[in-house]
Each structure stands twice: as structure tokens, then as C-alpha cells.
Image (tube, grey):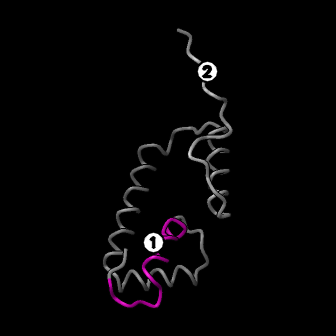
Amino acid sequence: MSCGEPHETECSEILDHLYEFLDKEMPDTECTKFETHFEECSPCLEKYGLEQAVKKLVKRCCGQDDVPGDLRSKVMGRLELIRSGEAVPDHDVSAAPPASQET
């Protein structure tokens, strides 16, 4: 997505790292770059607002639920694969194969 206007930071870079910004997982200098971009680019600001609203909704609706330890470790493992740039399998390779059905 791009608004078609020139910016110091490209829209694609902003959107690729939007969740890092939302989760406050980047240095202040990077945050400033995002804030400046949002002031200039209404499509990216709209996307930011939408993702922020979804994140708040999920937290409100599911924030009190306990997450099973194995699910947390699977999710964290998959995030590490994504961040490292490795290929992520379409299926869960850590799960046991499905039991065959008897007829």
C-alpha cells in the first residue's frame, strides 16, 4: 500500500513494521520516524488506527484468558522463524500426525 506521495520513510516500510511500533518494540528514534510519517500520510494513519483498535479489542475480549504454555512456545517459535527470515511451514511440524480413522 502506498499513498502515492513521497515520504522520507516509504509506506511499505511503515506497514512492514507497524506491529513493532504498536507493541513499543523499537527505539525512540524509529518511533519518531513513524509518528512523522503518520502526520504526513493519512492512509498509513488509518491503517495504524485500525490495527490499534483490533489490538485493543483482542486485549479487552481475551486479555484475561490463560494461554497454555505449549501454545505460547509454538507461537514464539514461529515468530522467531519469521523474524529470522526462515521459511515457515504451512502446518505445525511439532504436532503429532493425525490419527488414522478406522472404517
Residue 56 sits above or below residue 67 on the image? below
Q: CA distance from mark 2 to mark 1?
A: 41 Å
How many labels, in total?
A: 2
Q: For the magenta stretch, what is the residue range?
A: 4-22
**Residue behind mark 1:** 15
Q: Residue at left 35%, top 86%?
A: 40
Q: Is residue 15 left or right of residue 78?
A: left
Q: Residue at left 39%, top 80%?
A: 38
User: Can you tell which quarter of the image residue 53 is in?
Assistant: bottom left
Asked which secondary structure carries label 1, the reply is helix
Question: Which comes before the other along the chain, label 2 or label 1?
Answer: 1
**Outermost residue, top direction?**
103
Q: Residue at left 39%, top 56%?
A: 54
User: Can you tell which quarter of the image residue 80 is in?
Assistant: bottom right
**Residue behind mark 2:** 99
User: Can you tell which quarter of the image residue 84 is in?
Assistant: bottom right
Q: Residue at left 66%, top 60%?
A: 86
Residue 72 sits above or below residue 26 on the image? above
Q: Is residue 86 left or right of residue 17?
A: right
Measuring from the top left, give residue 5's x and y in whole percent.
34, 88
Q: Residues within 10 Å of mark 1 (few under 14, many from 20)?
A: some
* Three-letter amino acid code of the residue under disc 2: Ala
Of residues 15 and 63, the one nearer the viewer is 15
* Three-letter amino acid code of the residue under disc 1: Leu
Q: Is residue 16 magenta?
A: yes
